[in-house]
Amino acid sequence: MSKRNPVVRARKAIATLRSRIANGPLPHASNEWGGANVIIVTATRGGRYREIVTPHALEVSWLFNNLRDAFGDLVDGCSKFELYGRFEISANAAIRRHRDVSAVVVCAAILDEADGILDEMAGGRFEVLPIALGVTIAHDYVVSR
């Protein structure tokens, strides 16, 4: 593996994912994704998770699997909750904005957030909570302001 900066590697991985999404068709994961207090499902489960509810759960899960690999050297056991929570917020915002949102639109919104997060990481501005507060992440406080 390359010894380049992990932010540079993540940017390259995101560019590759963008190209894959633009050139379609979108791949599917073999199952719905879950981790870091986020689940991607076709029907709400309620409860104690941040949910992305979409008929495109397997396509979005494929993207999350790839983003996990792209950000692997940049997050730890604490910051992963912020990372995936931010992806959940961006996915759900896209879903709320568009009535019959496509998998491509949801995935593009998540990749836009991933680029923004990389900018924050590169500039030392990526904020995480020092302790887990249920499913709350630092960005929830920014969004509520």
Image (cartoon, rainbow, N blue to C red):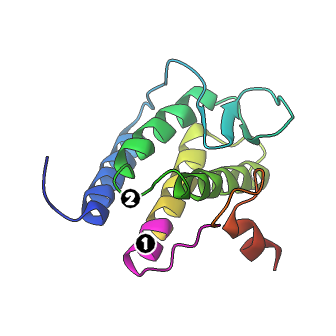
Q: Quadrant of residue 32?
A: top right
Image spot of residue 67 (x, y percent): 43, 46
Q: Are marks 2 and 1 in contact (CB under 8 Å)?
A: yes
Q: Quadrant of the C terminus?
A: bottom right
* 55 relative position to 119: left or right: right
Residue found 63% across the figure and 31% down from its top: 56
Above or below residue 133? Residue 56 is above
Q: Nearer the viewer, residue 145 or 90?
A: 145
* 26 relative position to 70: left or right: right
Numbered marks: total: 2
Q: Is-magenta flag for residue 119?
A: yes
According to the image, label 1 marks what residue? 121
According to the image, label 2 marks what residue? 74
Image spot of residue 134 (x, y percent): 78, 51
* 142 relative position to 62: left or right: right
Q: Quadrant of residue 52?
A: top right
CA neighbours of label 1 inside 10 A, class few (<14), some (14 to 19), many (20+): some
Magenta residue span: 117-129
CA neighbours of label 2 inside 10 A, class few (<14), some (14 to 19), many (20+): some
